[in-house]
Amino acid sequence: MKIHRFFPLALALLLSACGGEAHRTFTDLRGGMHRPLQVATGKIHVLVFVTTDCPIANSYAPMLRELSEEWLGSNVQLFVVHVEPDTTVAVARAHADLYNLPNPVLIDPRHDLAATLKVRATPEAIVLTSKGVQYQGRIDDAWGELGTKRAASTQDLLNAVDAVRQNRKPVPARTEVVGCLLPVPRN
């Protein structure tokens, strides 16, 4: 019974740590409602932040589709998140269609998600569980620097998700993203 007595305090602390964003609902391009920051115990949310004009982010579209298909029906949910201030549903839908992005695709023009998670670039990936951020950084090491793509030798995002699925901490838990800086959000 002591656990129940502390539940309201624990919930209040979690919400204040997330700035109340954990319960914020985002609509995908098909009208579905999602709470990507609210992760149930045993579930994993992967968020990948993109813009329509970032060639590095766009180059990962086939991999994101493959990962989404691989995780279908599992405890892992992938969210693609547009972070351009002027991105409308129509623009995001055209981009998603052009690059065959997996659903759900969310729009975050004011950077509600990006600011909460301290995202700085695209394509930045976040692995979340009910315990918070487990991994943040690049998808893989294919882009060593801007303008230089090579065959990836380390699949950072996939390794992080696999570690979390095996109840281990991802190593490394943070990597640097080579990509495009987030555009400045409108107020």
Image: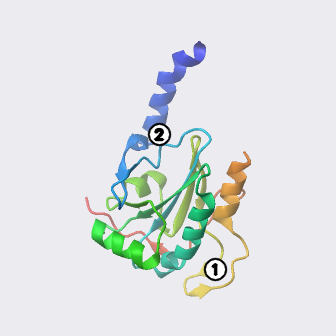
Q: Residue furthest bottom?
A: 147
Residue 24 lies, with reference to residue 16, above or below; the image says: below
Tell me the crowding category of disc 1: few under 14, some 14 to 19, or many 20 or more residues within 10 angstroms, Cα based.
some
Q: Quadrant of residue 167?
A: top right
- Cα distance in 3D space between marks 1 and 2: 33 Å
Horizontal placement of 169 versus 101: left or right? right
Horizontal placement of 7 versus 111: left or right? right
- Where in the figure is residue 45, as x and y percent of width and height? 55, 51
Counting residues from the start of the chain, the first of labels 1 and 2 encountered is 2
- Three-letter amino acid code of the residue under disc 2: Ala
Residue 8 lies, with reference to residue 114, above or below; the image says: above
- Where in the figure is residue 121, as x and y percent of width and height? 48, 68
The answer to whether residue 169 shows anywhere in this view is: no
The disc at residue 17 is 2
Q: Secondary structure at mark 1?
A: strand
Q: How many marks?
A: 2
Query: Which residue: 46% across, 77% down?
Result: 99
- Where in the figure is residue 24, as x and y percent of width and height? 37, 44
Query: Which residue: 57% across, 41% down?
Result: 130
Quadrant (top left/top right/bottom left/bottom right) for the N terminus: top right
Q: Nearer the viewer, residue 32 or 142?
A: 32
Query: Which residue: 61% across, 48% down?
Result: 75
Q: Cβ–Cβ below 8 Å for labels 1 and 2?
A: no
Q: Residue furthest left?
A: 187
- Three-letter amino acid code of the residue under disc 1: Gly
- Where in the figure is residue 62, as x and y percent of width and height? 55, 75
Q: Residue furthest front?
A: 73
Query: Which residue: 33% across, 55% down?
Result: 31
Q: Secondary structure at mark 2?
A: helix
Q: Which residue is mark 1?
A: 144
Residue 3 lies, with reference to residue 88, above or below; the image says: above
Quadrant (top left/top right/bottom left/bottom right) for the C terminus: bottom left
